[in-house]
Each structure stands twice: as C-alpha cells, then as structure tokens.
Image (cartoon, rainbow, N blue to C red):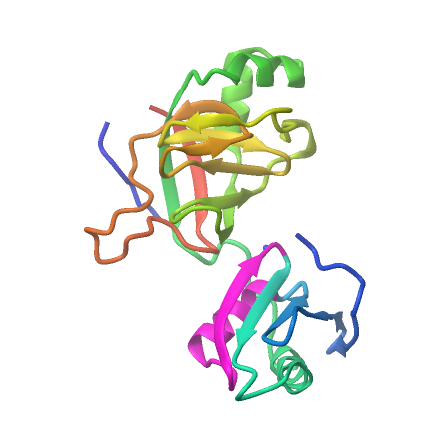
Amino acid sequence: MTGNAVTGDTGASDAGTSGTVAGDVAGFAPLGDSALMVSTPLARELLLSCQAAPLSGVLEAVPALNVVTLLFSPLETTATELQDAVQARLAALSPLPVGEGRALHLPVRFGGPDLGWCADFTGQSVDRFVDELCSLPLTVAFLGYTPGFAFLTGLPAHLQMPRLRAPRERVPAGSVALGGPWAGVYPTETPGGWRIVGSTDIKLFDLARADPVWWHPGDGVRFSRD
C-alpha cells in the first residue's frame, strides 16, 4: 500500500471564567503569570487568526477542543491585557464552515487487537462495524500528544469506545485507534490506552518532508479498507 491520497477543538474549567464576546461566551483562566487559557466555540478560528496575526506578547498558541491556551511573555503583556485583546479579536471572528480543509483519504488495514471487542460493544458484526467507521466524515480537531497525532472528531455516540483500563506500554506506529469521542492514529510507537482497530502505512510525521505533518486542523478525513 502506498501512501496518501489527498483527494479533495478539553473544555476549560469555570474557575476564573469571565467575559462575553459577540454572542459567544468565552471563558478566560490565567495559568500562572505567562499563560491564558481561552475557552470558546471559536477556538479554531481564534487559533488561525493568532497564527496569521499574532497578538502582542504572545509566544505560542496551543489548541485543544474548544480551547486555545496562549503562552505569553510577562515582560510584554499581562493576562488582563491579553484577555482584552482576545475579546476584541473574537468579536471580529465568524465561525468557519465545517470541512473547509483538505479532504484526506486514509487507507486502513482493519484487524487490530481490539476490533472484535469494539464491534461487539456496538452490537454489530465486524464487517458492519468497519463499514460504518469508513462511512464517517471525520475532521481533524487539533494536533497533540506526539508530533503528527491528530484528534479526529465525528464519531457518533455508539461508536465512541471506552479507553483501556490499563494503557498498553507500546502501541505500534501506524495503529488506528478509538478512545472516547476521538479517533486517531499513532504516528510513532508510544504507550497508549485507546482501542486499536487497524493500522496504516501512511507516515503522519516525517521530518524529510517540506511539511512534516500529514494533516492539519480543519482537514476532513475518511478511513477506507486497505
């Protein structure tokens, strides 16, 4: 099997939350003296905006589901000043359409050690379970955990698998897995507690490429049988 095939946001706590922005409630929680966690339905839009036009004093924007954590220099700004700037930025943003990113096709060899368990959990045969998984339009919500690891949203409730009680010490690179509301692929061998349903040969992180990461937030993803 050869590669690729380009065809075509944990919520913040209520502690420290304040601010209402243009009809969307945004939560702000300072983390020490050099980080501000922003919880907003416009997290992805805020991230892209900050990447295109960084806010003053911000060193890095770290995305999560409906959350962007802004790491800033306390010598250049404060959490209060940054919160004001974020509120102004959010007021100017509009929700991006779903699926505006690339459409990616990920061939998967189904047959992972947890595939049968997952099918049983849903009350389906393995073939029907795989067919349904391949029919889903998934979306890259954000990247994290390890370089190239994408958290894929779009699993309906009945396909959301409970994580293993005890994580495996080693999950092979390329393993396709399900955990809670997420689907994902392990780019490298790491420990992991998600349920493995298959594997892929696509290299999700390769420093030899101009763009080392295969996918990015906003990209649409579909699995297929390899």
Residue 209 is situated, as x and y percent measured from the top left of the image, at 21, 52
Q: Is residue 59 magenta?
A: yes
Q: Position of residue 87 (x, y in %)?
A: 67, 81
| Residues in magenta, as a range | 43-65
Residue 32 sits above or below residue 127 on the image: below
Instruction: Work out whether 56 lies above or below 210.
Output: below
Q: Is residue 83 above or below residue 37?
A: below
Residue at position x 60%, y 36% in the image: 155
**In-image side of 118 versus 21 (left or right):** left
Relative to 27, say whether 224 is above or below. Answer: above
- Who's the residue at 29% across and 31% down the image? 201
User: Which of 37 and 89 lies nearest the eye of the viewer?
Assistant: 37
Task: Indicate the quadrant containing the C terminus: top left, top right, bottom left or bottom right.
Answer: top left
Q: Is residue 11 magenta?
A: no
Residue 89 figure quarter: bottom right
Q: Quadrant of residue 129?
A: top right
* Front residue of 71 and 1: 71
**Can you say which quadrant of the picture contains the N terminus?**
top left
Report x, y in % for residue 68. Answer: 59, 65
Q: Position of residue 4 (x, y in %)?
A: 28, 40
* Residue occupying the point 27% across, 57% down: 211
Number of numbered tags placed on the structure image? 0
